[in-house]
Image (cartoon, helix red, strand yellow):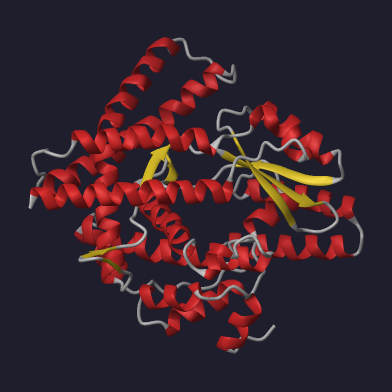
Amino acid sequence: MLRRKIFKRLLIGVWSLLLALAVLFAAGDTFGAGDPIAQIARPHLYSVARWEVGNFLKKWTHQFREQFPGADTEAEALARVRRYFELTAEINPLRFRVDQATRGFTQEPELPRLRQQLDELIDDREALEARIEETLEAMITSVLKEAGVESKFLWHRLLWPPVDFRIDIVPKTLVISRRDRIELLETKLIEPEITLEERGALEDTIDSRNLSSLVSSLAGLATYPSMLPDHFDLRNSLRFAAHEWTHHYLFFHPLGRAYYRSGDLTSLNETAADLVGDEIGAAVYRRFFATTEEIEAERAPAPATSEDPDRFDFRVEMATTRVEADRLLAEGKIEQAEAYMEERRLFMAENRFFFRKLNQAFFAFNGTYAGRPGAISPIGGQIQEIRNRSANIGEFLSSVAGFSSYEDLKESYGFED
């Protein structure tokens, strides 16, 4: 039994290395001399290759050391996960306080003590990290298999590709859009340590070329293993771990390989990953972590509410902003569209939704997620309809993964333009 367990881990390790290399060669590091945007952003560009090498050594050194551990009980594994995210809940506000004081925005007479406290909390959390990643990977794997997603390799029934992620500091992304219309042109990965001042200077330089740009935070990155932000709570970690795994799955199918072929295909990939992430993440949380009160609250019918015409509806307001911005840009009123988006950003802030910028690049990037606020594409509803017709997530993925053309998908399902 132990020999079989070791063999299985080594097999997964080899697969993981091969998949990491495949993803790495497919994505690459964008430092090319012929790429003007890369040249402008060069001081801040993030190296996926460097991260992959460092992560592989760290991950599999841990795996080797853990070949003969004492087996955890389920209660011990769950307690470790809960403790990890309790530490995250302590770290996040403390890290913010330290950052604000370090940048001179606030005064903290006890800043050295706060820094020491922060370092100690981070050290405590890092000691749990590798083990809780393995626990959550196993939980997501079990739920995916029960949802009908499974592959067979030789005599082993394994989920392919294996669920594998690292909780880390995730890079940011530089988003480039046309200025005269909302259209995603390209993205570049940016070092996470870039300051607000550096972000603004980089955006100003690119915008001076009659483009629209934004340095935005990421909720995850589909390297292999995928990267998840270290400030997420448990629910969001599960959600985005499943989201990024979906990209790994689609990588081996026509839809994933067609990701960059058009904006619609990018949106199909991201919207499908959102749906799988939301459903699987919620299912894992419900099975392993939800309290009785949470389960009962989820099952209870929503209370009847009367529609308040003055109630702020974020989803509606974002869609309204996008439609009006598109209209102004279509009429050639670029400066008016940009002024309008800034007015709307301030309006959102008045209603406690804060954005550093609302511009063409913002909507070009977020519009690829067709089920999220601000998206106006019909793809969100179409992906949901395919899921509604599917018996489970496995059938849904099998249904969408084989398409390499949006037109073919619409024709197959009878969707109209």
Choose top left, top right, bottom left or bottom right for residue 366. Answer: bottom right
Looking at the image, which is closer to me, 202 or 236? 202
Q: Residue at x 61, y 63 (%)?
A: 266
Looking at the image, which is closer to me, 309 or 208? 208
Residue 8, position in %: x, y?
21, 52
Q: Residue at x 60, y 65 (%)?
A: 258
Q: Furthest residue to the front?
A: 154
Residue 340, position in %: x, y?
80, 53
Give the answer, above or below, for where 145 lies relative to 241. Answer: below
Residue 36, position in %: x, y?
79, 39
Residue 405, position in %: x, y?
63, 75
The C terminus lies in quadrant? bottom right
Q: Is residue 204 visible?
A: yes
Q: Is residue 297 visible?
A: no
Give the answer, above or below, for where 372 lies relative to 115. Answer: below
Q: Is residue 381 left or right of residue 95?
A: right
